[in-house]
């Protein structure tokens, strides 16, 4: 019996090792560009807001003295500066939880990309319950904020953590209900199937029949990432820097990276759920043109373009809107967004059951009505 077991292990070990190696390679291929985008999103933000406010933004740090790359070395310089800063742990703080909190805040924003499809066959793990996985992972980030505020042994950090946690939980409910509308429309929890259910062109994507849910999902995403104008947890005039006031060095850097990683994730999910993911906005008849049709057809380039479009909106909001009061933020989440999502779920379910064209009459979507 033992010999037979050893023979089976010897037979399957190479295959298992190859599978693990391929999986690790896919993870590296996803995470390395993602972390690069997170770093350079900080530069893009400073440049875009600088342009909107008629100033230059970073333009000094360059690569090897090349003039037209002025400012492009700024994220690398910032990373080295934060790496060399001392990590100071306050007296009376819980050391283990204090160091764990930034990791808990960043990890879900990276792990969620495991089920996000970049193309028809480009996905790390194509699971049927991808939408549930996304909801579960994105709701874990709040624990990092709560732990950071409590473990810091500071009343200011704890107050900032409570305000931020209440805000995130409030808008998480509205985001969840918005995604229920997507589930009803697509008839599947698989993110690839959700994209395929939108096949056609710009006018067949879910942003038209689910327009209120799209607005609520994206605005709730801005609030959940604590971005302006919903950044009351970091209101310097009220509670200094919020839940991460006691952090320095790489601890602060991880919270900083978590915010920008969540921005990219929300932009990617908005693209997948409401804007066709990797789908081209043009009709298929226009994508058969030689050479040009390759660029106009479906592909990862459209997915990346849509992500950067929504990221630009994140930056635009910060340069445009003043910070809201905390009571205004909570009222918007509970008294406006939540009732609208519940009503619109009923409307979408009715349209799906009645198979109202052009969105809910295709074979892919008919199953949801059944």
Image (spheres, grey):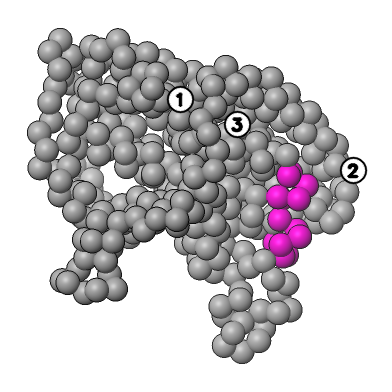
Q: Verify whether residue 210 appears in magenta.
A: yes
Residue to which mark 2 is pinned: 354
What is the distance, in whole Å, between disc 1 and disc 2 at their CAs? 44 Å
Location of the C terminus (image quadrant): top right
Q: Which residue is mark 3?
A: 176
**Mark in the foreground, 3 or 2:** 3
Against 251, is 155 above or below?
Answer: above
Task: Give the alpha-carbon distance from disc 3 to disc 2, as whole Å.
Answer: 24 Å
The secondary element bearing badge 1 is classed as: helix
Q: Residue at x 73, y 24 (%)?
A: 339
> x, y percentage for residue 180?
66, 35
Element marked by disc 3: helix
Q: Quick one: label 3 or label 2, which is nearer the N terminus?
A: 3
In this view, the residue in front, 36 or 71, is 71
Report if the CB atoms under discs 1 and 3 are less than 8 Å apart.
no
Locate residue 306: give its quadrant: bottom right
Please provide the residue range marked out in magenta. 199-211
Q: Count neighbours of disc 2 (C-alpha within 10 A) and say few if under 14, some if 14 to 19, many if 20 or more.
A: some
Mark nearer the N terminus (1 vs 3): 3
**Direction front: furthest residue:** 54
Q: Residues within 10 Å of mark 1 (few under 14, many from 20)?
A: many
Q: Nearer the viewer, residue 65 or 212?
A: 65
Snapshot quadrant of residue 20: bottom left
Q: How far separated are the C-alphas under marks 1 and 3?
A: 22 Å
Q: Position of residue 346 (x, y in %)?
A: 80, 31
Give the percent coordinates (x, y) of residue 317.
53, 43
- The rendered magenta stretch, by its main secondary structure, is classed as loop
Q: Is residue 7 visible?
A: no
**Please, is residue 22 above or below residue 367 in the view?**
below
* Nearer to us in this view, 336 or 24: 336
Tell me the tag on residue 232: 1
């Amino acid at each position: 019996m033992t010999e037979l077991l050893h023979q089976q292990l010897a037979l399957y070990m190479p295959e298992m090792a190859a599978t693990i190696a391929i999986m690790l390679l896919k993870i590296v291929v996803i995470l390395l560009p993602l972390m690069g985008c997170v770093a350079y999103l900080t530069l893009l933000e400073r440049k875009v807001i600088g342009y909107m406010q008629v100033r230059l933004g970073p333009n000094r740090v360059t690569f090897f003295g090349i003039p037209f790359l002025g400012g492009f070395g700024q994220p690398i310089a910032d990373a080295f500066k934060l790496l060399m800063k001392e990590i100071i742990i306050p007296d009376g703080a819980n050391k283990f939880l204090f160091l764990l909190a930034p990791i808990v805040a960043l990890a879900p924003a990276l792990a969620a990309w495991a089920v996000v499809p970049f193309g028809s066959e480009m996905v790390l793990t194509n699971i049927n319950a991808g939408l549930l996985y996304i909801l579960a992972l994105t709701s874990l980030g709040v624990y990092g904020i709560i732990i950071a505020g409590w473990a810091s042994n500071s009343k200011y950090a704890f107050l900032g953590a409570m305000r931020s946690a209440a805000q995130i939980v409030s808008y998480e409910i509205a985001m969840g209900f918005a995604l229920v509308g997507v589930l009803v429309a697509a008839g599947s929890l698989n993110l690839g199937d959700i994209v395929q259910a939108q096949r056609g062109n710009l006018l067949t994507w879910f942003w038209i029949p689910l327009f209120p849910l799209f607005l609520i999902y994206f605005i709730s995403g801005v609030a959940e990432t604590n971005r302006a104008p919903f950044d009351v947890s970091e209101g310097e005039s009220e509670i200094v820097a919020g839940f991460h006031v006691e952090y320095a060095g790489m601890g602060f850097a991880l919270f900083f990276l978590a915010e920008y990683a969540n921005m990219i994730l929300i932009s990617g999910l908005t693209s997948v759920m409401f804007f066709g993911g990797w789908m081209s906005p043009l009709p298929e008849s226009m994508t058969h043109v030689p050479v040009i049709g390759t660029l106009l057809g479906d592909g990862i380039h459209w997915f990346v373009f849509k992500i950067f479009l929504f990221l630009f909106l994140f930056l635009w909001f910060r340069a445009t809107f003043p910070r809201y009061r905390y009571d205004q933020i909570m009222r918007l989440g509970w008294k406006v967004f939540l009732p609208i999502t519940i009503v619109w779920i009923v409307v979408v379910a009715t349209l799906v059951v009645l198979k109202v064209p052009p969105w809910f009459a295709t074979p892919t979507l008919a199953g949801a009505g059944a």
